[in-house]
């Protein structure tokens, strides 16, 4: 522990900090200031998402009433009536897992449980509105996806117990299924055979639909969670093509309209334009499907039994929607990012996400950042609870997801105690990395983002993830606040190119890395001639600035700078040299231990534009005297570091630099008005000894 209570009471008046203001970014950054349609518990920097089957743990009622976390249930029979009533009384929202595209066509897992095997192992799959669609209506066979070999596709085909069918999003029958599921789970429970819910009168609820599978006898407790949900969460939001006859007819018609000829195999077509359109066609198809599913929830939540946890900041009832966006951590994640940016599949770009970190160098923060950028700063969080996972969520203002353990509880409480600073905080870094979500769908540049993020971590340069919307004329003043914008690949249309030119003309430093191009015409009449290999011509974006872009160069354009790096990877020393002239306007971690000590900067307009520097330690060892160089024109009245790992102290800047005496797992440096800094210090100093006791051993991710 680096500070005693006495040290934490250093007089603020003695801190000689009086820098000029940063260039203005306006009242709000590109992240939205708040999500008006969402309830208070669902806001960025506030949401706590806990997978906790059964409702509020016994003895935790007071804590959960204060936290107001959303309690996620992986199955509809996991909470009984008493648990539902307890959540409603304490205004603790409930969430339920549903499938994004998959469904259970038959009841084999139900029959397995009834035989006495796997009694509870698959309870989350055996509730009425998740299985047995074949039996209820033969029409639902059309909802199953067909593979390119003409056979029905089984998801998890190796697991005969769960038997999930992959859904065909071009089938109206699949949407009918989703509407019925949404109606069932969001409105107070009605038996399917009742006169006011006449969907399947031949298939009423039975004792098997009881929370305990009928084993305790009457009175049965049948799906008490229905009508008491404030959130739904999609698992397995796959985005694969369908080859059923009706689907083939639909996409063949689409391609003939686009290219003038019938195309039987767009996925493997020799013309790059056709292959790109195949990716766009399915992204748009899935986007429309999820848009409709989302609207069903907003329609049915109007009859909710828990309006108190479904009411948004705007006063309207709203069903909050999340999903498992695990594939964002790989090259295929471009498809989900496209949905987040150009459709409304969900309220968050993920939530309870099973990220893989092999593409992102062992870190979760890269996926959190790019996902949040694609959706105006809506938060996301990784599944489970671990030291670095929770630290990364706090640092980037994502969601703390998981549950269990004294250390985890301390991190949750820390976030709540500092909600004045963290709730709906905005991006605060002065270096941006730009990813074009639209063209990234077809150019495969997502993993290059992750590689560049890692390079910046190694150089100690905190950064914001940016997307093409940030290039709009509306966002011009905000974008001008970035000292450097780096673009590792991608293609840009005329409007986006104009935004990049405005940025440079306004004094910014634009760095183009690799094949950054001007988007070309994506369509052409192919005619009846045999198909030949065709690749869209590469037109370097540098040409828009009067440069050929064929060799490395750096040129001053008025008060701005354009740097062109033709290689896809820029060596670290060269990248450092490029950024160095603007380093005086940047935050800079001086000792990064090869990118294993990182920082991310947020700003909070509601607290005097305070800056919050979130530090994360991936090294597995306690770090001492972590030094951070600050932008030379940054203004603040007081400075301190606080941590849920059990320390807090005021900081004294020295020569435009601050030094954090100790970094265990996560620490928050607060630079801002005296009252905001004092309040932050107070959240930890009251319980330093208790926080130290619940520390967990440091690990490398």
Image (cartoon, rainbow, N blue to C red):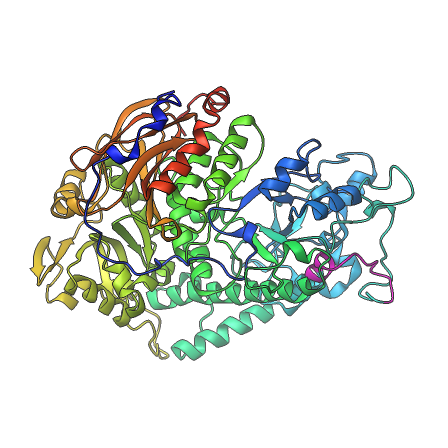
Identify the residue at horizontal 20%, vertical 62% (top origin). 503
User: In the figure, 477 relative to 423: above or below?
Assistant: below
**Rendered image quadrant of residue 685:** top left
Identify the residue at horizontal 49%, vertical 58% (top origin). 35
**Rendered image quadrant of residue 180:** bottom right
Locate residue 111 relative to residue 66 in the image: left or right.
Answer: right
Q: Which stretch did the figure color magenta? A: 181-195
Identify the residue at horizontal 92%, vertical 43% (top origin). 218
**Rendered image quadrant of residue 592:** top left
User: Is residue 194 one of those drawn in magenta?
Assistant: yes
Front residue of 684/661: it is: 684
Front residue of 344/93: it is: 93
Name the outermost residue toward the right. Answer: 218
Q: Position of residue 74 (x, y in %)?
A: 66, 44
The reply to whether residue 77 is visible in this rendering is no
Q: Position of residue 536 (x, y in %)?
A: 27, 66
Q: Quadrant of the N terminus?
A: top left
Locate residue 112 relative to residue 414 in the image: left or right.
Answer: right
Disc count in the image? 0
The reply to whether residue 659 is visible in this rendering is yes
Q: Quadrant of the C terminus?
A: top left
Q: Position of residue 621 (x, y in %)?
A: 35, 21
Front residue of 269/84: it is: 84
Q: Position of residue 335 (x, y in %)?
A: 44, 57
User: In the figure, 691 relative to 570: above or below?
Assistant: above
For the stretch drawn in magenta, the main secondary structure is loop
Identify the residue at horizontal 56%, vertical 69% (top origin). 247
User: Is residue 114 one of those drawn in magenta?
Assistant: no
């Amino acid at each position: 522990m680096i500070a005693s209570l006495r040290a934490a009471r250093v007089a603020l008046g003695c801190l000689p900090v009086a820098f000029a203001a940063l260039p203005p970014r306006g009242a709000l950054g590109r992240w939205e200031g708040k999500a008006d349609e969402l309830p208070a518990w669902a806001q960025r920097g506030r949401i706590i998402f806990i997978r906790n089957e059964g409702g509020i743990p016994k003895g935790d009622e007071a804590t959960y009433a204060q936290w107001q976390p959303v309690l996620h249930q992986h199955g509809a029979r996991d909470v009984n009536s008493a648990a539902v009533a307890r959540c409603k009384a304490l205004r603790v929202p409930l969430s339920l897992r549903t499938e994004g595209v998959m469904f259970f066509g038959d009841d084999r897992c139900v029959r397995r449980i009834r035989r006495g095997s796997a009694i509870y192992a698959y309870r989350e799959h055996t509730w009425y509105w998740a299985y047995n669609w074949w039996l209820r209506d033969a029409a639902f066979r059309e909802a199953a996806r067909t593979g390119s070999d003409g056979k029905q596709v089984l998801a998890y085909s190796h697991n005969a117990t769960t038997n999930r069918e992959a859904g065909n999003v071009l089938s109206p029958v699949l949407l009918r299924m989703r509407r019925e599921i949404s109606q069932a789970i969001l409105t107070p429970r009605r038996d399917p055979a009742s006169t006011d819910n006449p969907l399947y009168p031949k298939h009423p609820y039975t004792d098997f639909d009881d929370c305990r599978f009928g084993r305790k006898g009457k009175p049965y407790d049948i799906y008490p969670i229905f009508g008491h949900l404030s959130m739904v969460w999609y698992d397995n939001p796959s985005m694969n093509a369908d080859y059923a006859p009706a689907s083939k007819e639909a996409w063949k018609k689409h391609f003939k309209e686009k290219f003038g000829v019938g195309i039987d195999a767009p996925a493997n077509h020799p013309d790059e334009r056709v292959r790109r359109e195949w990716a766009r066609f399915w992204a748009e198809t899935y986007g429309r499907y999820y848009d409709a599913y989302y609207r069903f929830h907003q329609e049915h939540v109007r009859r909710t039994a828990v309006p108190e946890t479904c009411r948004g900041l705007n006063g309207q009832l709203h069903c909050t929607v999340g999903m498992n966006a695990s594939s964002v951590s790989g090259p295929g994640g471009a498809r989900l990012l496209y949905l987040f940016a150009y459709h409304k599949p969900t309220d968050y770009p993920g939530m309870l996400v099973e990220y893989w970190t092999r593409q992102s160098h062992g870190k979760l923060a890269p996926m959190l950042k790019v996902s949040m950028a694609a959706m105006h700063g809506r938060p996301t969080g990784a599944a489970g609870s671990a030291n670095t996972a929770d630290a990364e969520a706090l640092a980037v203002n994502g969601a703390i997801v998981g549950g269990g353990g004294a250390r985890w509880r301390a991190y949750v409480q820390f976030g709540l105690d500092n909600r004045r600073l963290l709730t709906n905080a905005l991006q605060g870094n002065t270096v941006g990395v730009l990813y074009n979500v639209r063209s990234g769908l077809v150019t495969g540049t997502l993993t290059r983002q992750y590689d560049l993020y890692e390079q910046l971590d190694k150089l100690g340069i905190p950064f914001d993830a940016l997307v093409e919307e940030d290039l709009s004329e509306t966002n011009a003043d905000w974008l001008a606040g970035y000292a450097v914008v780096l673009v590792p690949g991608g293609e840009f249309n005329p409007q986006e190119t104009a935004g990049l030119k405005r940025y440079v003309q306004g004094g910014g430093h634009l760095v183009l890395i690799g094949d950054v191009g001007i988007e070309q015409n994506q369509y052409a009449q192919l005619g009846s001639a045999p198909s030949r290999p065709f690749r869209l011509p590469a037109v370097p974006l540098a040409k828009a600035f009067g440069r050929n872009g064929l060799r490395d160069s750096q040129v001053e354009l008025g008060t701005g700078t354009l740097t062109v790096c033709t290689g896809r990877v820029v060596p670290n020393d060269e990248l450092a040299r490029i950024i160095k002239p603007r380093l005086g306007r940047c935050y800079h971690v001086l000792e990064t231990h090869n990118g294993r000590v990182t920082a991310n900067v947020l700003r909070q307009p509601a607290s005097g534009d305070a800056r919050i520097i979130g530090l994360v330690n991936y090294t597995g060892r306690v770090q001492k005297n972590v030094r951070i160089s600050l932008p030379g024109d940054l203004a603040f009245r007081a400075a301190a570091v606080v941590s849920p790992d059990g320390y807090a102290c005021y900081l004294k800047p020295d020569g435009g630099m601050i030094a954090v005496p100790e970094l265990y797992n996560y620490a928050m440096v607060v630079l801002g008005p005296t009252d905001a800094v004092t309040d932050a210090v107070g959240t930890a100093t009251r319980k330093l000894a208790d926080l130290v006791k619940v520390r967990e051993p440091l690990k490398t991710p």
